[in-house]
Image (cartoon, rainbow, N blue to C red):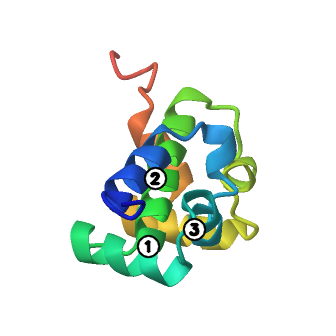
Amino acid sequence: MANRNIVERIYRYVVQLPEARLADLTINRLAVRFEVSRCHISRRFHSERGMTLAKFIQRRKLQLAERFLLQEPALSVKELAARLGYADCQYFILRFREHWGESPGRYRKLASPDPFDFI
């Protein structure tokens, strides 16, 4: 019974996880939290959701990255990468570009309104 709806429980947990705890989130930590094996939850998540659990966690972090870029313009890309748990800023930039189609810096620039657009 403990494994019933495990994928849905994990999904809801990750989506509702406070941003400060998302940076340290790993499949191993989820396995410990939900008292199941890493392989089991990875396999079940992929089977039921159509994407790997690692990819889901990464997407969640990248969604949060987008929000930070737009809401905190003074936050550097390097600081953002560290805040989201990426030890390597270049790796973060690569993943962000794969997901959003632009580098974080360019994404921020394109999304931010230009104060001189009205001229």
Which numbered disc covers residue 31?
3
106 or 49, nearer to the observer: 49
Give the camera-side residue of 106 and 76. 76
Which residue is denoted by mark 1 in the rendering? 41
Residue 16 at least partly seen: yes
Whether tag 1 and tag 2 are in contact, CB under 8 A, the answer is no
Q: Residue at x 37, y 81 (%)?
A: 43
Q: Is residue 57 above or below residue 75?
A: below
Task: Name the residue tied to disc 2.
Answer: 60
Return the disc, 2 or 3, that comes first in the chain's sequence: 3
The amino acid type of the residue labelled 2 equals Arg
Q: Mark 2 and mark 3: span between their CA atoms?
A: 18 Å
Q: Secondary structure at mark 3?
A: helix
Give the percent coordinates (x, y) of residue 59. Answer: 43, 59
Q: Quadrant of the C terminus?
A: top left
Q: Is residue 68 left or right of residue 98?
A: right
Q: What's the distance in space between the residues labelled 1 and 2, CA to CA?
A: 17 Å
Real-space CA distance between mark 1 and mark 3, rounded to the nearest whole angstrom: 7 Å
Q: For label 1, count other residues whose C-alpha is less than 10 Å away and answer few (under 14), some (14-19) or many (20+).
A: many
Q: Position of residue 118 (x, y in %)?
A: 33, 15
Residue 66, horizontal then vertical, whole percent: 47, 44
Is residue 78 rendered to the left or right of residue 3? right
| Callouts 1 and 3 close, C-beta under 8 Å | yes
Going from the N terminus, do you reach mark 1 or mark 3 first?
3
Between discs 1 and 2, the one toward the N terminus: 1
Foreground residue, 118 or 111?
A: 111
Task: Specify the amino acid type for callout 3.
Answer: Ala
Q: Is residue 17 above or below residue 10?
A: above
Q: Amino acid at mark 1?
A: Ile
- Residue name at image x 59 percent, y 36 percent: 18
Give the image location of residue 72, x and y in percent: 62, 30
Q: Secondary structure at mark 1?
A: helix
